[in-house]
Amino acid sequence: MQATLATAAEFKGAGLHSGAAARLTIRPAPAGHGIVFRRTDLDGALVPARWDHVQPSRLCTLLQGTNGATVSTVEHVMAALAGTGVHNALIDIDGPEVPILDGSAAPFVAGILRAGLRMQRKTLRAIRVLKPVEVREGEAFARLTPADHLGIDFAIDFADAAIGHQEKRLDMANGAFLRELMDSRTFCRQADVDAMKANGLALGGTYFNAVVVDGDRVLSPGGLRHADEAVRHKMLDAMGDLALAGAPLLAHYTGHRAGHALTNRLLRALFDRPDAWEWATCSDDLQSRLPGAGVDRYDPAILTDRAATRAVA
């Protein structure tokens, strides 16, 4: 069955790149609605959260509605919705950028679980990948291969010793997103921060909503939440960008130095090949293997506390 929120969940904060204050409210929506943003500051202009509404943007995922309204930095809230098994929601936002909060998806997850989930009497369909699909850009690539559940593996390489080479592989079924990925924050190099701010970006970024590194040093107070927090965050981003497929994916995603743009190119390549995918009606067994299965047993207060305090030396 499909699912939505039982009540609304509200979030307030600043946009990572614009620095502008934003209020975002995730509201329940009827079965078959999907995930749609509504710009309350633009007479309710609608922006569907779908792969074919993604526009080129530096450093984040940006969506554009048919009327020109945009919403940027949607990847963390989309990952939270996918990771909690929410299929239908109307997301009111009073500006052009989703608030960054603590730089992870954990506050969104906690808010969704606090609002509660409501099952809907309509069958859920998933997108089953039938053939491998891959896109490349230089040394970076992203790939989807057939699987009976969503899996993600990712590899990154950075010159800074605080990050270096990291790789991780996860089966995303049954709450793995909450256990393994949701609290991992966006990250960047101090030199990149300086360059972005000089170019009018990252105006809302702080050492508290991003992991900032400089060589072998982690500059953000409290250090890392996971020793491999960087690759975990890249997997979180991939989860959010894949959620723009419009339905749960039955596939294994592999990313090597991939980013938002490459993952969107991958979805476009998939849907350009009708022989590479099909709709699958979700039986109880299949739905039990999706990322959001069983997440209603998690205590949102515990999740919020863990995201705020977890650190490793």
Image (cartoon, helix red, strand yellow):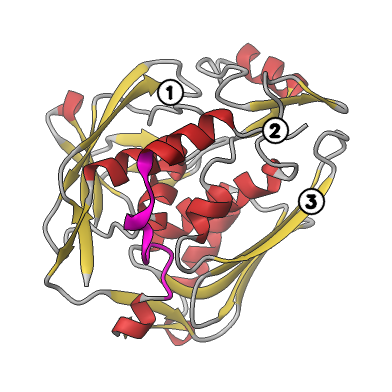
Whole-percent x, y for residue 156 in the image: 76, 50
Residue holding disc 1: 15
Residue range highlighted in magenta: 289-300
- Above or below, 241 relative to 10: below
Residue type indicated by callout 1: Gly
Q: Residue at x 25, y 74 (%)?
A: 124
Say if mark 2 contacts mark 1, CB within 8 Å: no
Tell me the mark number nearer the camera, choosing from 2 and 3: 2
Of pointers 3 and 1, the one earlier in the residue sequence: 1
Q: Amino acid at mark 3?
A: Gln
Residue drawn at 44 percent across, 27 percent down: 101
The answer to whether residue 141 of the structure is visible from this angle is no
Q: Is residue 298 left or right of residue 144?
A: left
Q: Secondary structure at mark 1?
A: loop
Q: Which quadrant holds the N terminus?
A: bottom left
Between the residue at mark 2 and the residue at mark 3, the CA separation in whole angstroms equals 14 Å
**Residue 93 colored in magenta in the image:** no
